[in-house]
Amino acid sequence: MANKRTSEGGADRLGPELEGLLSRVPPPKAPAWFAAKTLARLREQKLSPKETWSWRLGWRWMWAAGTAALVVGWVLWDKPAQPAEISDAMVFAALDALVEQDEENRWWAGL
Amino acid sequence: MAGEVSDEELMTRIREGDEEAFRVLIERHQDRVYGTVARMMGGAGPEAEEVAQDIFLRVWRSAGTYRAEGKFTTWLMTVVRNLVFTRAGQRKRRKDIDGEDRVDEETGESLMESHPDGSTPTPLANLAYADLAKAVEEACRELPENQRMVVHLRQYEGMEFEEIAKITGMSLTAVKALMFRARESLKKKLSGYLTASK
């Protein structure tokens, strides 16, 4: 066991032989145009409709505004409706006006 | 240039919308990011390039929330890991990973890595190297994602296990266990080359 560990360079390593093999095949490098294309995409995103006022405002503000609107709506909805108050005097005045109108109509009709 | 600007300083400038600082940051880390993405996604090509670009665009957007608490590369590789795993999951749902060599759409050339020593190898040596590269690529591709990530970060980025644990969000023991399992799989898959190289 001790020999095995030594030959593989420790339990948490790949071992010199495997490491040597993998190091002969390094990961690919980024193409020469990579930075330029990334910056171009950044500028494109800045100009795209996705980057309009809603994007700049940030989703947190949008979320806060939406929640506030819901709360206000709920409070208004929950508020008991005020019953319409009509005083007796207003009712009698309206009836008097109707009677007076009726009398006037009758006079014009010669009745 | 008097001295190299630190990554943290570049991030502060990026937060203020400095595109030049962003360009410097990309050029400094593009090989690391692109190489990791390519290894994780099964090879170089337009898809790996797009994902690597997405990672840098995410860095730009996250600059406002970035806190220079640890090493910048640890934070960057965490972004890489998150996006690559998300994309890999999406891709897995779409199709199985194919084993074909990828070809540059513009030049028509194979995107398999070039010979690392920069020499002009003989056709026979070239063939042997291409064969080896393909075998290593395939062996890595067949590893589960977590194992592939751990091997890549350890072998090619030279990271410590503690750093890898932070990036992958796993315990130190779990990372070491993944490394062990990856080693066993790679040894089995590349046994022909290992015995030949003795």
Image (cartoon, rainbow, N blue to C red):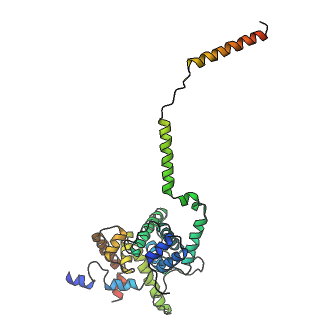
Image height check: is B193 above or below A75? Answer: below
* Closer to us: B113 or B61: B61
Q: Position of residue A15 (x, y in %)?
A: 30, 83
Q: Is residue B88 left or right of residue A90?
A: left
Instruction: Give the side of residue B156 with respect to residue A33, left or right.
Output: left
Which residue, as the protein is rendered here, is positioned at the far top?
A: A111
Quarter-wise, where is residue A37 in the image? Answer: bottom right
Image coordinates for residue A82, horizontal then vertical, percent:
51, 29
Residue at image location 27% in from the left, 70% down from the top: B173
Residue found 41% across the figure and 74% down from its top: B72
Residue B101 visible, this angle: no
The picture quadrant where one finds residue A87 is top right
Residue occupying image coordinates x 38% and y 85%:
A21
**How many marks are shown on the rendered structure?**
0
Residue at point 43%, 75% (across, down)? B8
Q: Is residue B146 left or right of residue B88?
A: left
> Do we see residue B192 in this rendering?
yes
Residue A5 x/y as whole percent = 24, 82
In the image, residue B37 above or below residue A88: below
Residue A106 image-quadrant placement: top right
Query: Which quarter of the rendering shows the C terminus of chain B?
Result: bottom left
- The single residue placed furthest to the left in the displayed view is A2
Front residue (pair B41, B72): B72
